[in-house]
Amino acid sequence: MIAVAAPVLRLLRTTPFRLALLYLGLFVLSVSVILLILYRTTAGFLEQEIGETIALEVAGLQDQYRGSGLRGLVDAVRDRSVATHTNSIYLLTTPSGTILAGNLNAWPDTQPGAGGWSHFKVSDYGGTDARPSTAMAVTFTLPGQFRLLVGRDMSELDQLRGRLMESLRWVFAVTVVLGVGGGLLLARGAMHRIELINRTTRQIMAGDLTGRVPRVGGGDEIDRLAGNLNAMLDQIERLMTGMRQVTESVAHDLRTPLSRLRARVELALIRDTDDPEVYRTVLQDTIMEADRLLATFTALLSIAEAESGAKRTDLEPVSLSEVVRLAADLYEPVAEEKGQTLTTEIRADATVRGNEQLLAQAVANLLDNAIKYTPEGGHIALLLEGAGHGEAARVTVADSGSGIPSEMREKVLERFVRLDTARASPGNGLGLSLVDAVARLHGARLVLDDNRPGLRISLVFPADTAPQAAGPQRAMVAKSGTITGGALHPLPPPAGEG
């Protein structure tokens, strides 16, 4: 019994059930008003009809009295009293109360109400049929203090009222039962769907991040809530998985350089030499190894900062053309040193809302990766395009290197992921992860395509990131990175080399 009562008590305390009760109360109240109006209208109409009939009979008897006198009135009342086809009630008495004609045995002991109307039980005054019903009559005094009562047996109206009241009680009872039952079903359905959400949250709190809130497919508010919760859980699972992967990757990738660093220092300490150049070389190598470790941590911090959205409040209009010009100026010497050609084309003076430092870092990482993985004599193109179909701007870096297989293009955006062909080159696998985090911070997309040969990677900004209409279209091409342009804040070195 207690096991059954507990779910019922929980159901009674739920918000859906309380709302169902509220709607039930309003529904029952509206139905009651409708039924009351129906009853009053039906019964009142019939009572009005009876009153009008009685008034016509009174008018006829008054005419009879004026035309034929008392004798004619007595005969008329007597004739109407013995008629079997009518349920009318008559009584004519002398001033002393002696009955002259009619179908009642005594004058009703009631006080007339408004308009002279009286209500009484017919059986109490010996009606001809001893009906147990009530009667409605009007009384008035004739010249000579004779009193006349004309009424109508209300048995048919009483029966109709009884049937109406019985029907209305049944309708009211059925309305309450259906309302309570429907409210319970609705509350139980809503409570079941909310319980599914609670069950999923408990599953998540227990450590299982794969749980998702089921959707019934109706597209209602709870379905939309489930969709938002599932999207949030997907994001949480992705972040938790990324955090776990980062922790494992940091522990794995930093163990080797730290061990190498310690071994180098330990080897210098155990050497029996007084040559200062040996120690200088060891210290220089140690500083280089420490710089690489610091670069890794700097990249991780930049990615975390971009993914957390902490810089979203610092967004302001940024000229992408200035960012591209400065990046080209910075990497022109690097490309020339490797015997590569860097071509920059700025087709529009595009402006977007963003963080200038992070955008510059992203473009620097793209150029650094392109130069790193393009062989000597290769070609690298840096392109800035203005507004397009639903786009505010597009920054593209294309190279003629080895490229990235299509099945690995999503994988390389993860932290510490490097292709087998890139293992021999310096880097930590964080460059594209940082670019992807910066893109998502700015609501942009990172698109990787085949350049045939090489890789073509684009940073696409949607139209809603543009703070104002793009400036006049102008194109300028600079071979080998020779570009003139306005000043910009110093471009940071590439973080998280890919």
Image (cartoon, grey):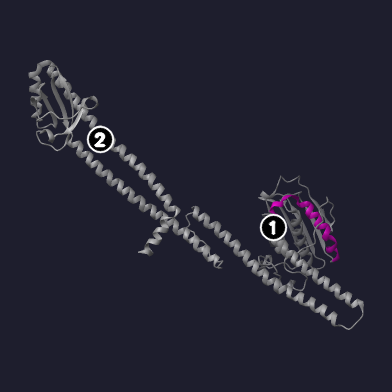
Is residue 271 in view? Answer: yes
- For the C terminus, the image quarter is bottom right
Residue 484 vertical placement versus 406 (above, below) = above
Query: Along the line of sight, which residue is nearer the eye, 231 or 115?
Result: 115
Identify the amino acid type marked 2. Ala
To which quarter of the image does residue 458 belong? bottom right
Q: What's the magenta region? A: 309-337
Going 80% across and 72% down the picture, which residue do you hit?
A: 289
- For the N terminus, the image quarter is bottom left
Q: Disc 1 marks which residue?
A: 439
| Secondary structure at numbered mark 2 | helix
Marks 1/2: CA distance?
A: 77 Å
Q: Is residue 314 magenta?
A: yes
Q: Which x, y percent locates residue 194?
A: 47, 58
Q: Is residue 362 magenta?
A: no
- The disc at residue 43 is 2
**Quick one: label 1 or label 2, which is nearer the N terminus?**
2
Q: Which x, y percent locates residue 288?
A: 82, 70
Residue 38 vertical placement versus 240 (above, below) = above
Going 79% across and 76% down the picture, which residue do you hit?
A: 261
Say left or right for 146 vs 47: left
- The secondary structure making up most of the magenta span is helix
| Secondary structure at numbered mark 1 | helix
Residue 470 vertical placement versus 74 (above, below) = below
